Image (cartoon, helix red, strand yellow):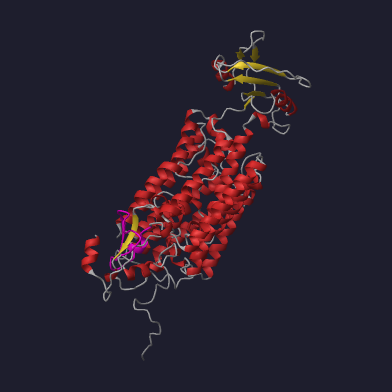
Amino acid sequence: MSSIQRDMSLTGQPPKSINTQQKLASVLGLAGLAILFLALFNVNFPNKTLWLSLSLISIAVGTIWFGKAAYLNKHEGIKNDGVYFKSLTSRGFWGWILGITMTLFYIVLYWFPQYLGLVKDGDNIGAIALFDPLSKFLSGNPASQWFLYGTLYTLAILAFGIKFIWKYRHNRYEIIRTCSVMFFQLSFAFVIPEILVRLNQPYYDFKNVWPLNYELFAGYKIDEFISAGDVGLLMLIFGLLSIFVITPILTYKFGKRWYCSWVCGCGGLAETAGDPFRHLSDKRQVAWKVERWVIHSVVVFVTVMTTAVVFSYLQANESANISEWSNLENKMVFMSDTQGKPINERILAAQKAGATSVVILNTDPNTKAPTLENTEGITINYFFASEIENKEALEKINQGKAATLISDRSEGTNLNVTEGQQTTYYDNLWLSKEFFVWFIIGLLTLVFAWVMLFKREELAKDAKYGAVGYFVVVISILLFTYVSSPGKLFFFDAYQLRKSYGFLIGAMFSGVIGVGFYPIFGNRVWCRFGCPMAAILGFQQRLFSKFRITTNGGQCISCGNCSTYCEMGIDVRAYAQKGENIVRSSCVGCGICSAVCPRGVLKLENDGMNGRIDGNQVLLGNDVDLMELMNSK
């Protein structure tokens, strides 16, 4: 009796079920998750350190064991493994279940952490309490929902990273870059920031660069850096250097892959835990058009938000803007700028805000202390002092120690400051809000002019229109609101802008959609549609970078593996068939297209800028003058 093979597959049927070792590994991993699940329902574990260790080790060992059983008993090389036949990886029932589960987890994490066991004024309970021993060991503080998330995030990258390395063990590039993201996540994103907190230093993830780290220039963060002294100042300088020096240089030499595929935690999770879903990325042209407009709109949003936040912070540092809502209760106020608003009005404003006294510092030793002609209504003490003569005394006051300030007037008496006196300083920043606004205008104008003068031929027509439109709108609003209403840039309060960005982009897009929808939209939906860092690096990569993916069109057999597994939705095969270099803003240089190519058609390269975008479209049957081609080289 004969049987009929009804499918068209040349490679045989995909595995119908996982093997015995994978089943045992799954049980072990699920047992670790079960401990966390029980903790959610306030099960009291007598030894939290032991049970947390059992949970994390079980999850890690189960994941690694599963990967070992899946790949190490097979030959090295390309493994499709029936991804389109499995429910989990083909938007089937289990794929939707996983997507919904992860989405619900992110919703609870961001907006309802109390259900995870977070207690603001007391001891944690539930799952978060289970992580308290590890958090106290690293930072000395109880765990938060972000520590729980950071621990699981790091564990996922490490465990799935080993699984990824075994899957692509035939490719040296994949092994090295995966080890890189594992190292940066474990050290720079998880361990080092927690140790900094233990050392009473600001929490800082050194690999998180603006605009991905959109809170870098928030007022509270700048104050934290300044109050930390030299260490905090070095962190702030490093953050600025990362934006204006380190990032452009590395992108010029290596493309955006140095960050998106070698350093970034979002990319690290996408490449490791999200690897089984990379083929689900939308390859349609309409998705590419939506991607360009959405991601560049996010860049404009974060630029506007950051500009407004910094402007607001600089403005709040001016003593001329002290008001009755400045929250100066029981504080000694120091100010030094005497221009603009009369000093007596500033003292009255500080008095209404609850200040105990005001010290006017004279920063210029060659000028006399200002006079206060009108003292009507002033009931608090005010004092004039030379900043240079009182340098040591001011340092003691900043440290909370007692000190005596010497009067800047011959007829004045000295001022005794008691130990523990709370202080607030105004006018002590070297950067003024006026300089900052014009610096932003100049920087945006310079970048726009450079692109339009020297790189406009490399931009599509709609990209040119979009760039002009965004530039005109942002600059016009900035100039108009600065001249007419300097209290608010872009018509909105800076805090509300940052809060809106944090909700819409930082939470909804990067978390709920970006990771929760891995099984639905693919593993790089956040990097592709929402990450402003990826957009800025993509702009640099497209217009001034040595990186490209070269193709050998004569060797391409049009199998489609490269396009199928491109997580950024690029139709790589179309470039390969033409023998054209792949230079796309969205390409993160993961190298998977090269790793899954059975003919070695694709190669990641760094070379000169000449002829980088114009591919050598030399195929059999093309009318090509070979001598002209050789001479052009």
Most extreme residue toward the bottom, as rendered? 1
Measured as percent of width and height from the top left, residue 91 is found at: 51, 69
Measured as percent of width and height from the top left, residue 216 is found at: 53, 41
Q: Is residue 38 visible?
A: no
Residue positioned 50% across, 52% down in the render: 532
Q: Quadrant of the N terminus?
A: bottom left
Q: Is residue 580 left or right of residue 145?
A: left
* Above or below, 295 relative to 353: below
Q: How many marks?
A: 0
Measured as percent of width and height from the top left, residue 142 is found at: 57, 39
Most extreme residue toward the right, as rendered? 377
Residue positioned 55% across, 40% down in the render: 438
Residue positioned 67% across, 30% down in the render: 320
Q: Quadrant of the C terminus?
A: bottom left
Q: Quadrant of residue 429?
A: top right
Instruction: Name the foreground residue: 344 vs 161.
Output: 344
Q: Is residue 409 left or right of residue 192?
A: right
* Above or below, 344 relative to 29: above
Measured as percent of width and height from the top left, residue 176 is found at: 33, 52
Q: Is residue 35 left or right of residue 4?
A: right
* Above or below, 195 relative to 256: above
Instruction: Name the foreground residue: 35 vs 16.
Output: 16
Most extreme residue toward the top, as rendered? 411
Q: Main secondary structure of the magenta part?
A: loop
Magenta-colored stretch includes residue 145: no
Q: Which region shows up in magenta?
A: 590-615
Q: Is residue 454 visible?
A: yes
